Image: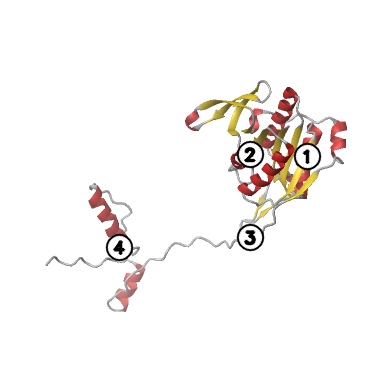
């Protein structure tokens, strides 16, 4: 069996500018372009190798929408694991791997990243949980004989790497590699009432709400001004002083480090160290 791992995510999230809270609207939620490409490759490989396609996701009840879209496109079965959408990647991969192993899945297709986090770590965790090969970040795919796939992977510096996956494996693709087929009307209508297997996810305690505060730099420690009232006011307001915005010095490594420490102490960021005792 072949599987497509899909994620239900808001494609146009609203972020509160004050507390950074992210609001998810089901009207703009669905699968990303990368997940849609993964589903299309799963359907193509299923047709080429004569195997059914299983669509799986981990999320709330609203995530059934992406599974019904997969069923309408041609998936034979759909499974949703009831997991909080903010669960860590390793938790999501663990619950998905358990369902894939139970279903006897050999090849798993995933999107190379999700829209909410963008880390693309779930496919790697999933390959580790299943104990199979991984081919991540694919930009081109060629399907061969049964479970024999040749792919092109993006590397840093504009380079490419050609891979061959023979047998079981987890493959993650970019969204531009394929466009999801349009579901026929009868299949789309039937998918609305098609059964979806729902599994209970792990029970976890709710995480405490994060307290967000504005950044405040560390205060500088300054010595108290001396002199009469006028001199103290002038020292506090720094009036009459000429500002030096830049300084160019050419020093060796030891002298440069000493110069930096001296400047930090002068500006009040470091407590002046006591003078070393003279040798006896």
Quarter occupied by the N terminus: top right
Label 1 sits on residue: 78
Q: What is the C-alpha distance between the residues marked 3 and 1?
A: 29 Å
Residue 11 visible here: no
Check disc 2: other Cα within 10 Å, few if <14, some if 14-19, many if 20+: many
Residue 275 as seen in the image, left or right of residue 216: left
**Between tags 4 and 3, which lies in front?**
3
Check disc 4: other Cα within 10 Å, few if <14, some if 14-19, many if 20+: some
**Between tags 3 and 2, which lies in front?**
2
Label 4 sits on residue: 265
Point out the tag, 2 or 1, that comes first from the N-terminus. 1
**Between tags 2 and 1, which lies in front?**
2
Given contact means CB atoms under 8 Å apart, are the residues at marks 1 and 4 in contact? no
Q: What is the C-alpha distance between the residues marked 2 and 1?
A: 19 Å
Given contact means CB atoms under 8 Å apart, are the residues at marks 2 and 4 in contact? no
Task: Pick out the residue farthest to the bottom.
Answer: 228
Label 2 sits on residue: 130
Point out the tag, 3 or 2, that comes first from the N-terminus. 2
Q: Quadrant of residue 119?
A: top right
Q: Position of residue 118 (x, y in %)?
A: 60, 43
Q: Position of residue 223 (x, y in %)?
A: 32, 71
**Front residue of 28 and 224:** 28
Location of residue 85 with respect to 97 vertically, above or below:
below
Quarter occupied by the C terminus: bottom left
Residue beneath the point at 84% across and 29% down: 184
Callout 4: SS: helix
């Amino acid at each position: 069996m072949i599987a497509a791992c899909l994620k239900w995510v808001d494609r146009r999230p609203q972020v509160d500018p004050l507390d950074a809270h992210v609001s998810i609207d089901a009207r703009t939620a669905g699968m990303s372009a990368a997940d849609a490409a993964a589903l299309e490759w799963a359907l193509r490989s299923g047709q080429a190798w004569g195997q059914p396609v299983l669509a799986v996701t981990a999320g709330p009840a609203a995530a059934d929408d992406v599974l019904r879209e997969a069923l309408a496109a041609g998936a034979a079965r759909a499974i949703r694991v009831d997991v909080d959408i903010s669960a860590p990647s390793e938790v999501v991969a663990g619950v998905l791997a358990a369902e894939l192993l139970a279903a006897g899945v050999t090849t798993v297709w995933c999107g190379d990243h999700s829209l909410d986090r963008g880390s693309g770590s779930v496919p790697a965790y999933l390959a580790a949980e299943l104990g199979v090969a991984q081919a991540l970040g694919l930009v081109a795919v060629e399907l061969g004989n049964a479970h024999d796939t040749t792919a092109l992977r993006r590397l840093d510096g504009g380079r490419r790497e050609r891979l061959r996956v023979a047998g079981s494996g987890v493959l993650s693709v970019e969204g531009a590699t394929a466009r999801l087929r349009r579901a026929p009307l009868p299949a789309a209508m039937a998918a609305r009432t098609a059964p979806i297997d729902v599994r209970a996810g792990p029970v976890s305690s709710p995480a405490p709400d994060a307290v967000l505060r504005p950044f405040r730099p560390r205060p500088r420690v300054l010595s108290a001004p001396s002199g009469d009232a006028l001199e103290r006011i002038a020292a506090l307001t720094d009036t009459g002083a000429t500002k030096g915005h830049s300084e160019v010095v050419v020093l060796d490594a030891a002298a440069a480090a000493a110069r930096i420490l001296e400047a930090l102490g002068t500006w009040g960021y470091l407590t002046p160290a006591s003078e070393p005792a003279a040798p006896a």
